[in-house]
Image (cartoon, rainbow, N blue to C red):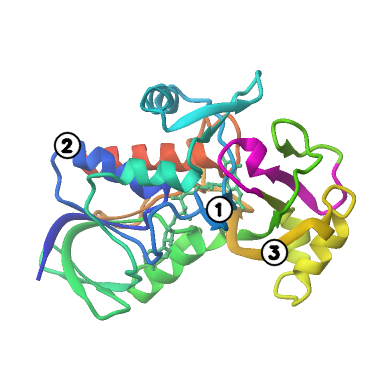
Amino acid sequence: MNHYDITIIGAGLTGLTAARKFHSAGKDVLLVDKGRSVGGRLATRRVAEGKADHGAQFFTVRTNELQQEVDQWIKNGWIKHWFGEDYPRYTAIDGMNGLAKHIANGLNVRTHTKVDHWREYGEGYTITANDSSTWRSKKIIVTTPVPQAVALLENSGVEAGALERITFQPTYVGIFHFEKPTNLPPTGHIDKQLPAGVERIVDHYKKGISKDVVVSVYMTAEWSTEHYGENDVLDRIKEIVNGYLTFGDAVSEQLKKWRYAQAAATHSRSYKAVTGSVFVAGDAFLRPNDASGRTRFESAFISGIDVAKAVMK
Ligand SMILES: Cc1cc2nc3c(=O)[nH]c(=O)nc-3n(C[C@H](O)[C@H](O)[C@H](O)COP(=O)(O)OP(=O)(O)OC[C@H]3O[C@@H](n4cnc5c(N)ncnc54)[C@H](O)[C@@H]3O)c2cc1C
């Protein structure tokens, strides 16, 4: 059976950031994810000859830690300034999932592996995945959205305590491939004066990441909660944004349903030690002085940095 110093459950930005820190410190770290690829909510879908981001679209920077990384990512040619002068909005050159893959390069990652539970064993744990594979680890960091972390803790016989109060809201995203260019602004992004229920619309051709005209329509958390699970969601979205897009030119349409998109309430520390060797981190864990107060790319990044430091103390 394999043994690791640290197992990180979830290879989204929080897990990837923590794993990079451990990797640099020479720790034996395993990163596992149930998905087909790393990235989690940094998600990009191929559509015909093009692609569409359908999770995070961009990120802003309020901390020195992320600014340093951003400067390096720009030098590497991984990201670019998309729009916004007061708070620059950065986005990935190849789509946000491409950035996650760059960060994961060289790390020990196992995808298609859904952790089911762990049990104490000696000075560490035996971890079991849904495919019945098992391995041992001295420490565990859970970086899934909090409701999934709570379920894992409960399955493993660990009290989740106050984490149970952190709930997440869903988001629906309609993804449309068009034959002809859209009338959206030159940046390809619009999030002002949209009809009720619509958060933002993004044309990925104009954004510069797609050869084809592929557009993502993001619905608000409130709208997505109200219509969650209904079977005519895509038709409803099309009806609402009909004045912005010409659906007569549409070649294909798809719907992405995020059950856990953003936290409705956050934790006021950047990670939580639930026992001496089991930690929970993620975008819902904010530093007490967090300048934005919201779950976002930067809160995931900072949580990853802080939990790695705490584990190595
Ligand atoms: C629709 C949408 C739009 C967004 N827009 C923006 C934006 O424009 N700007 C911004 O800053 N932020 C945005 N965000 C938020 C941003 O994407 C997240 O804050 C950030 O990516 C979260 O990273 P994370 O690593 O904490 O979690 P995640 O990315 O959710 O990673 C958790 C990982 O855990 C894995 N996992 C879950 N359970 C298990 C298990 N049992 N075993 C193994 N693996 C498991 C999942 O597969 C996933 O990959 C958006 C999010 C969504 C959904």
Q: Is residue 42 left or right of residue 244?
A: left
Q: Which mark is nearer the camera, 1 or 2?
A: 1
Secondary structure under the numbered disc 2 in the rendered image: loop
Indicate the quadrant where residue 193 lies.
top right
Disc 3 and disc 2: Cα gap in Å? 45 Å
| Residue 49 - label | 1
Indicate the quadrant where residue 210 lies.
top right
Whether residue 195 is in magenta: the answer is: yes
Disc 1 and disc 2: Cα gap in Å? 40 Å
Q: Which mark is nearer the camera, 3 or 2?
A: 3
Q: Residue at x 70, y 37 (%)?
A: 188
Q: Residue at x 48, y 41 (%)?
A: 94
Q: Which residue is mark 2?
A: 25
Would you place residue 224 above or below residue 13 in this image?
Answer: below
Whether residue 204 is in magenta: the answer is: yes
Disc 3 and disc 1: Cα gap in Å? 14 Å
Q: Residue at x 72, y 54 (%)?
A: 178
Q: Nearer the viewer, residue 96 or 166?
A: 96
The three-letter code of the residue at mark 2 reads Ala
Q: Which residue is mark 3?
A: 253
Q: Which range of residues does the magenta coloring cover?
A: 194-213
Asked if disc 1 is less than 8 Å from ligand 1, the answer is no
Q: Which sits earlier in the primary sequence, circle 3 or circle 1?
A: 1
Secondary structure under the numbered disc 1 in the rendered image: loop
Asked if disc 3 is less than 8 Å from ligand 1, the answer is no
**Residue 153 image point, x, y percent:** 38, 68
